Structure formats: C-alpha cells, structure tokens
Image: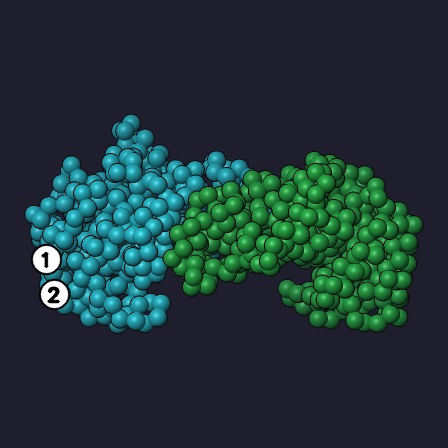
Chain colours: A green, B cyan
Amino acid sequence: MLRTPHGAVETPTFMPVGTKGTVKGLTPGDLRTVGAGIVLGNTYHLYLRPGPELVREAGGLHAFTGWDGPMLTDSGGYQVFSLARTRSISEKGVEFASVYDGSLHTFTPELTTRVQEDLGADIAMVLDECPPADVGYGYHQESLRRTARWAERCKEEHRRPDQALFGIVQGGLYPGLREESLARTVEIGFPGYAVGGLSVGEPREQMLETLSLTAPMLPADKPRYFMGIGDPVGILEVIGLGVDMFDCVLPTRLARHGTALTAGGRINLRNAEYRRDLGPLDPECSCETCAGYSRAYLAHLVREDELLGHRLITLHNVRFTVELCRRAREEIVAGGYEEWARAWISRYTGAAA
Amino acid sequence: MLRTPHGAVETPTFMPVGTKGTVKGLTPGDLRTVGAGIVLGNTYHLYLRPGPELVREAGGLHAFTGWDGPMLTDSGGYQVFSLARTRSISEKGVEFASVYDGSLHTFTPELTTRVQEDLGADIAMVLDECPPADVGYGYHQESLRRTARWAERCKEEHRRPDQALFGIVQGGLYPGLREESLARTVEIGFPGYAVGGLSVGEPREQMLETLSLTAPMLPADKPRYFMGIGDPVGILEVIGLGVDMFDCVLPTRLARHGTALTAGGRINLRNAEYRRDLGPLDPECSCETCAGYSRAYLAHLVREDELLGHRLITLHNVRFTVELCRRAREEIVAGGYEEWARAWISRYTGAAA
C-alpha cells in the first residue's frame, strides 16, 4: 500500500503514462473507471510545454488535468538521454535540445526538483543519467557516482512536505555497480527507490538477472519502483521479484496502433481475421469497450483511423493492465503467486500450460 | 416530435454526423449524455467500408455502433456528387469512383434503398442528385425530374415497415423548379421531406430565400429536414423558417481543428490569448468539458494534437448545438422565438444587441 496526499494505492500498481498531462485519449473519469491507481506525468514534456509556470498557476498538474488521484512525475532525465539529439553532461547538469523546436535547455538537479514542485505530483524523482547498457564499466561507474551526487542535490533542493522525492538506482548490468549505486542512494535516504537504466534495450534475461540482484537489497519498508515496464509478462516477472510500482507507454501506445491485450495474447485488429468477428475484444474483460463493442466494429474504427478506435482500445488496454495487477495482488495475498503467474504467462504466450 | 422505432425526438433537432459509424471521438454514451436525439450515418462511406453485409450481419448500424437511439442514414447521393472525381449519371443511377481506392461502383435508387435497409436506420433517404447551384436552369430541371423518378423507384423498392423513407426536394435556386420538385415529391408521398441542394456554397441570403419559399409548401404534418446546416446562426435561421431536423459535420469538424462554439461566438483555442486562460471554455455551459477543464488545458491539448483535446471539444460543440435546439424549442413553445433568436445571434456574432 502506497499512501499519498491524493489517496492510497494498492500495490503492485501499474502507472499509466500521461506524457503531456493526458493519458492519450482518456479523461480522468475514464482512468478512475478502469481502476487506475496512480498516473505518471513527464517533466521533460511538461517543462517544455505548457511550462511549469502555467501548471503552477493552474494549481498544479492535478488541477490542470483534472486527475485528483495519486500522481508521479519523472525528472525528465530519461527523456533527455533518450530523445535529445544533442546533449552535454557535466557535473552541473545536462544540456539538451528540445525535441519540439531544437532550443537549448539545461536540466540541473535543482531545476528538475523545482519544476516537479511546480507540477506538484505526489511523488517526484531525482534527476539521473540513464546511459545505454553497453557504454562500458568505466562510464557506468562515473555516471552512477554523478547520479548519486545529483540525488543529494535534489534532496537538498526539495522543499514540498506534501511531495515525496524518490531516489534512483543505476549501474548498468554490472552487479558490483548496481550494489554501489544502491548503497550510495540508500545512504542519502529517500522515502522510495526506483530501479532505472533497465528495460532500455538489453535482453530480458539480463534485465531480470540484474533486477533480481538489486531488488532484494532495497529497503523492505519503502516502495520499489521499476521504471519502464508495461508488457503483461514483464509486469508479472518484476512483480515476482518484489517490485511495487512500474510504468510504461506500451499499453496506450499499442492501442493507438490497433493492438489490444487479451488473456489469450496480443491481437492486432488490423488483421483480416477480426474484420467480421462479432465477438467481444476480450471475452473475459468487463470494461466499457469489451461490454459494448465487437472486434469487427473496433477493427473498422482502427482501419479508418477513427479517434474512437484509439480511445476504446486504450481504455481496454489500461483496464487490462490494471486488472492484471489487481489479480497479482490477490494471488500474492493468497500465497499462490508464482504458480498463478506461470499459468497466466503460459496462456498469454500460447505456450502449453 | 419525431417518433421512431428507437424512441421519440423533440424537434427542432440537430443530428450529429457519424460518417463512418462513429461521431468522431464520442461514444454512444457521450451522445446520450449531451442529449443528442438522433444521429446520422453516411451510406456512401458505410457501403464502401465496412460494407452493408457486415453491418446487417451485426444486426444493423444500431447494434454495430452501440447507438440505440433514433438514427438516420442519407442515401449517399450527396457524397457521390461532392466527393467523387469521376462519375457518370444516367437514368439508371450514378457511377462513381470510391474515394478510398478509386474502384468503380454504381448507386441506383434500388441499391441505396437496399443498402439502407441493411444499415437499418429509423429513417432512410431517397437517392437524389445534388447539382451545384450554378449549373443552370435546364440542368436543374432535368435533374429534379430524374431525382423524382429515382424517388419513385426508391419507394417501390423499400420494404422495411420499421424504417421511414424520406423524399428530397431539389431544384437549385429557381423558385419554379423548387415548386415543381416539391409537387412531384409530395405526389409520390413520403412520411417526411428533406430540402436538399442548399447550403452547398451559394450565398446564405439565397439559401434562406429559397428555403423560405419551399418550406411553407411542405406538408405541415410531416417532418421537414434541411440537409447540411450546423452553424448556430444558420440553425436558428432555418428553425425560424419551420425546419424540424438538420445535420452538419461543422460542430464536430471545427472541434478537431481546435475551434469551440460559445455563447459569445467561436473561439479558436490555438490563439495565444487562450494559452493562459484558466477559465472554462464556455462559462454558460454545463457539459463535462466546461465543468472539468480550463481553456488553458484545452489549448495545451489542441497545440499538442492530443486525442483528448479533439474529444473534449467535440463533446462540447455537440452539446452546445443540441442545447441551442432545446432552447429554441422552449422559445417556440413560449411564443417568443423570433425575438430570442435575434438577440442570441447578435450576441454570438458580436453585433450590438
């Protein structure tokens, strides 16, 4: 259970991503209806547009967007390193070119902390560098130490008592560096910890191996946030390793490409087989989309690139992912998680159960 | 009051257009929430995609789309004449190239009637030719006579007792031809009549003049449908001339371009002045959009081309237009329509009241 000024969230919990202050296509009411517990906003995008001054003036991201439940903002670090074409990193911070207009900006630990205070989410994140897995031991070591110094500066800058600031563990795929990053971050002391720098292109096996070494060392009484996972199998795997929170654009992005998540696996509604399929999207789901529309109608909307298709499939995919977490929670409480998760994955991937 | 197998509709009524089986961005639930009474579907588009066979198999357009209220389909005639690049008209029907893939199709009065029976709306329309206003007297005369013969064939072909088939009056801007078209169409006998071939680019003055000559001659005990008007001023003007029903993509199309209808006139949310405007979209409107979001947030969504922006403004514009009709009805009943409409238009257009 994660407690925030905007309510408590049962864990494990999937955080739908509202990059620019909206989970694409959905209203806050929709998010509540599908049972979303906590929503994520991207500081990189919101800093550039519409800008933190306006959001602060509006009363924060909650008031601006109408979502009055728990909310988390990232620090923008990940976007700076994954989106920007030009950037230079120094002890002070990171300079980058806006993905919108190429204008130059510098994110420092102090700035991203202040910006996140303006945005006013319940949970803010420290500025971290998120290097690709393959940059080598030396770079990862140097980077995680700078990230730890940045984390200290973030904590020092952070003022809002109604906002929690989480630390982030880096260190690539090196067990020793993960351990060092974790020790340095925990030493600074945060009310929650994220594992960053994974699920960034490395093989799934390596990701899980690194996470399985890192997760048990995180303080047991603090929330554990795994950054950037949202496929059903990955979610169940990281939950199995003790993760409480995770986020990813996958369920919403897939939806906009016409792909729906179902208990029997992903289905792409552009495929000819769904064109005349008058059955529900996922017979086991009770969301508005599955209750009210056929695969054939959704396939028609997708082919015609109709807004309603994006919206209805997004609604379902978020509901599906939220519901998966709810089931996982039940199974954890009941004590049968491992077995249940194995059977669920077998069915989802089409492997023999 | 218009009675249909799917419920009664208070008139005058604006029909939101669900071109491809969806009012872009809105669910049937949204349409009910904003008070939409009757929704229009386009036979041209639905015939080409997903095809009438699939819609019939799904149980008709009501079951396929989830809208269980009153519905009207046009015959596709207007789209054939306005969208298609190549077409040839004969007594038999009209050949056209699909706007999707250029494939050749022929609409005959018999075919569009059968297709509309497959779609299964409460109201179907006869196939008509809708020539541009300026093709000349001779062409309009020839065309309206052919349209009358087509209307007869539509009526002969029409089978469904649970579907009303409406006739359409053409005749360009020539009073004599309008009179002839009206007499021929009424002679065939339909449960409702549309005025077509207006609001197709001619000056508003001429449109109103022609309508004001035509409308009073239509049977007083049958619904009068003016095809293709949806701007607030035009709506009030045609209501003033005795029109009961009208449709237009304008409110929904404007929304997708970031333009909202308000009591004080149209506002384009891309304009800089709305960027920091934390007030509601239309202070006098109680729709979900106006109740829950600021102009600044909507302006942000529009600038970022976010799905939610299209959706929320569409919701408002449909609600605004539906509400305008509801007010008009009240004023008609109260006996003060003309005065009220004049004042409303003055305020909307910014003229001195």
> Callout 1: helix, strand or loop?
helix
Chain label for disc 1 = B
Q: Position of residue B46 (x, y in %)?
A: 32, 57
Chain label for disc 2 = B
Q: Residue at x 15, y 38 (%)?
A: B220
**Is A199 above or below relative to B341?**
below
Q: Position of residue A186 (x, y in %)?
A: 89, 50
> Callout 2: helix, strand or loop?
loop
Q: Nearer the viewer, residue B76 or B222?
A: B76
Q: Residue at x 70, y 38 (%)?
A: A334
Q: Is residue A194 visible?
A: yes
**Is B324 above or below relative to A241?**
above
Q: Is residue B324 left or right of residue B238?
A: right
Q: Which residue is mark 2?
A: B91
Taking the view exactly as shown, the residue that stands out farthest to the front is: A352
Q: Tell me which amino acid carries mark 2.
A: Glu
Q: Earlier in the sequence, mark 2 or mark 1?
A: 2
Q: Tell me which amino acid carries mark 1.
A: Arg
Q: Is residue A276 left or right of residue B223?
A: right
- The residues tagged by marks 2 and 1 sit, at their Cα atoms, a distance apart of 9 Å
Q: Which residue is mark 1?
A: B149
Q: Residue at x 72, y 40 (%)?
A: A335
Q: Is residue A47 visible?
A: no
Q: Position of residue B77 (x, y in %)?
A: 23, 59
Taking the view exactly as shown, the residue that stands out farthest to the top is: B334
Q: Quadrant of the N terminus of chain B?
A: top left
Q: Are marks 2 and 1 in contact (CB under 8 Å)?
A: yes
Q: Nearer the viewer, residue B172 or A224?
A: A224
